[in-house]
Image (cartoon, grey):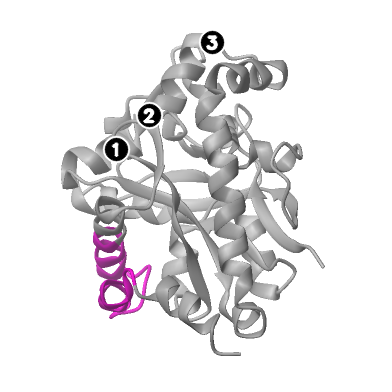
Amino acid sequence: MRTRVGDIQFLNSWPVTYALRKGIVPANVHLISGPPAELNRRLLTGELDASAVSSLLYLRHQEEFIPVPGLCIRSDSGVHSVLVVSYQSLATLKGRTIGVSNQGATTPALLKILAHQRQLKINLEVTPLRFPQILEEYPAALLIGDEALQASQSADGLQWWDLGEAWNHWTHLPFVYSLWVVRRQLLEQQPDVLQELTDALSASYQWGKGHERELRAIMRKTHPFEVNFLKRYLQALSYDLDARAWAGLTRFAREAEAVGELPKGSARRLRSGVGSASEAAFARRGDG
């Protein structure tokens, strides 16, 4: 039986999952595409065995999921796909309500943290509206993924605040938007799944790194962004879940606790589990 794996439908996941999705890298997985919020829900309900999930979801459910070693979606500066956009000056938004795309989970918490850090009192309201219609109902909007990329290429006087860039300027750490995880319950029954999925995703990512020009050309068939813009966008992303990524994730957990987005102790549990959760899963492979 193939492992059911959630695949974020945005361009930022393509360098890791495209080769798997197209069967270029053979693997015993079935990829199921969707926006982050939907994948989060399906993983929690058991409709998925593994998935790329919002960092906030992982932090809220650390006991239920084990990270796939080495892989995440992160940025170390501005990234153009996590934006607060407005036709007005961003300085005028104090005290106002910002429309939040219902596609994500981590980015509203990130906006709340950055607004708190800058003493910018704003209200957030989740909405199914999409760009540009969302700006007909709200003075500003938080957009993510391909929709944010579209907005950033708008030439009609739109202003934006890149939250990835703001986080890096403040903390000097990367921001981890998503990471791949496996349900702990599944690994207790089938411990080999973690290694198999790690191998599959790693092989697909290696293909993506080796075929960047080809991948960009394929992207442009469905997302008509200018080629140099796509190149800069993909170069702004990183997929390494390394020590700096863990440091950024731990800082995010600590700041999310401070604004009430995570229960107290979440960052401490993450620090104590760094590097050990996946190792424990591997160790269980020999238990049977």
**What stretch of residues is rendered in magenta?**
250-275
Q: Amino acid at mark 2?
A: Ala
Residue 252 magenta-drawn? yes
Q: Which mark is residue 76?
A: 1
Q: Of helix, strand and loop, which one carries label 2?
A: helix
The residue located at (55%, 9%) in the rendering is 226
Question: Could you tell me how far apart the alpha carbons at marks 1 and 3 are, in whole angstroms?
Answer: 22 Å
First in residue order: circle 1 vs circle 3: 1
Percent x, y of residue 89: 32, 25
Q: Nearer the viewer, residue 143 or 281?
A: 281
Q: Amino acid at mark 1?
A: Asp
Asked if disc 2 and disc 3 are in contact, CB closer than 8 Å, the reply is: no
Asked if disc 1 and disc 3 are in contact, CB closer than 8 Å, the reply is: no
Asked if disc 1 and disc 2 are in contact, CB closer than 8 Å, the reply is: yes
First in residue order: circle 1 vs circle 2: 1
Q: Nearer the viewer, residue 47 or 66?
A: 66
Residue 181 magenta-drawn? no
Percent x, y of residue 211: 57, 23
Percent x, y of residue 65: 52, 73
Question: Could you tell me how far apart the alpha carbons at marks 2 and 3 are, in whole angstroms?
Answer: 14 Å
First in residue order: circle 2 vs circle 3: 3
Q: Which mark is residue 236?
A: 2
The residue located at (52%, 15%) in the rendering is 154
**Magenta part mainly helix, strand or loop?**
helix
Q: Nearer the viewer, residue 74 or 209?
A: 209
- Which residue is tagged 3? 227
Q: Amino acid at mark 3?
A: Val
Asked if residue 70 lies left or right of residue 255, the reply is right
Judged from this view, the residue extending furthest toward the right is 1
* Mark 3 crowd level (few <14, some 14–19, many ≥20, 10 Å Cα): some
* Mark 2 crowd level (few <14, some 14–19, many ≥20, 10 Å Cα): some
Residue 155 seen in this snapshot? no
